[in-house]
Image (tube, helix red, strand yellow):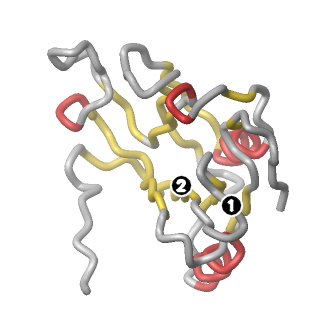
Amino acid sequence: MNSSTSSAFSFEQSSHVIPPAELLTVAFSIFPDVSGSSIKASTWPWERIVQYIASPTKEFASKQDCPLIKLATFGQQRTEKGSLRHDANVLKVTGLEGDYDAGEVRINEAAMLLSDAGITAVIYTSPSHTEQAPRWRVLCPLSHPSPRGSERICWPG
């Protein structure tokens, strides 16, 4: 696991892939920043998405400048503030994203739990991650796209 000590944020600092899905192709969207005013939609093999996350090509001055990846496709409906990144604009969900900010579970522990459950995923640290307080994201592709709204999960407890 790599860890950056620079004050600049990178899109990804470390990643774990749980088990690879060699034949899976996933549609996804990248928003260049949190404003969501523009979007780049792509469809890639899962392994290429994993490589994209594992090999950042740029560092960002702040968390607000980091691109956002969504495993979903979006329309062109904008909010009053001009954002394309909102639930009503989602067309299809192609995977699930999760943010972990509690600072207790290390990325390798999460990777082991997902692997044991047979869940295909990539996990990478977030800009606020430290060894003392782990923070990370997980992306899990779906086997096929689902309509908007089907990604809502109620977790017991």
Q: Quadrant of residue 51?
A: top right
Dot placed on the residue nearer the N-terminal end, 2 or 1: 1
Q: Nearer the viewer, mark 2 or mark 1?
A: 1
Instruction: Give residue 156's position: percent from left, percent from top.
Output: 25, 84
Horizontal arrangement in the rendering, residue 34 relative to residue 140 (left or right): left
For residue 83, above or below residue 14: above
Which residue: 62% across, 66% down?
134
Instruction: Give residue 121's position: percent from left, percent from top.
Output: 60, 62
Horizontal arrangement in the rendering, residue 47 relative to residue 154 (left or right): right
Mark 2 → mark 1, Cα distance in angstroms: 20 Å
Instruction: Give residue 76's position: percent from left, percent from top.
Output: 27, 15
Which numbered disc covers residue 139? 2
Please state, as top left, top right, bottom left or bottom right, where the N terminus lies in the image: bottom right
Q: Amino acid at mark 1?
A: Thr
Q: Amino acid at mark 2?
A: Leu
For residue 93, above or below residue 121: above
Q: Nearer the viewer, residue 139 or 141?
A: 139
Which numbered disc covers residue 108? none
**Would you call the spot at circle 1 few (<14 residues within 10 Å), some (14-19), or many (20 or more)?**
some
Q: Which residue is mark 1?
A: 130
